[in-house]
Amino acid sequence: MPEPHDFQRLLDYLKSLPAIDPSIGSGTGTGEGGLWWVKFIIDIDHPMAWRIVQELGHVLNYVSLNERLPTVFMPVSPPPYLNGGPHNFLSWVIESSDATFTPSDCAESLEGHLPRPVDDPEQWKLDED
């Protein structure tokens, strides 16, 4: 059975991103695959929200042909017709099914690719902004 993952570095990093709600859940899957996940909310009304989504999607899903991470970043939601819209029920998940790729490795990858300092909204601006 895989060792439990230490999520603290990744949780702290995600909490420092603009637009991320600090209430972040995390956990591991059952079995021997090493699956781990974090689930969080992005304030979709925050001016940096979609830039955060774009950057996380780029790094976590497809940073390059030669540098793919064993992660998936995706939206998750209960049925909107039963619960309501994205302001209250849209969440985001980062998942990894590779037991050798830890949440700390994920944080390190994000730190290496996202703007620095990550908590400074000015660093997230593009030339077109």
Image (cartoon, rainbow, N blue to C red):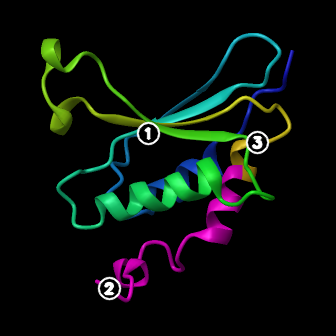
Mark with earlier residue (3, 1): 1
- Give coordinates of residue 50: x percent, y percent: 32, 58
Q: Identify the image quadrant of the C terminus.
A: bottom left
Q: Secondary structure at mark 3?
A: loop
Q: Residue at 68% of width from left, 70% of height from top? A: 112
| Residue 84 left/right relative to 43 | left
Pointer 2: residues within 10 angstroms few (<14), some, or many (20+)? few
Looking at the rendered structure, the secondary structure element under dot 1 is: loop
Q: What distance separates the C-alpha of mark 3 from that of mark 1?
A: 17 Å
Q: Is residue 59 left or right of residue 30?
A: left
Residue 128, numbered label:
2
Q: Nearer the viewer, residue 18 or 126?
A: 126
The image shows a total of numbered marks equal to 3
Q: Quadrant of residue 88?
A: top left
Rendered position, 92 above or below 116:
above
Q: Which residue is mark 1?
A: 24
Residue 118 % position (x, y): 49, 72
Q: Secondary structure at mark 2?
A: loop
Identify which residue is drawn at 73% across, 48% down: 69
Cα distance between the residues tagged 3 and 2: 35 Å
Residue drawn 60% across and 47% down? 61
**Please, what is the three-letter code of the amino acid marked with disc 3?**
Thr
Q: Earlier in the sequence, mark 3 or mark 2?
A: 3
Q: Which residues are magenta?
A: 106-129
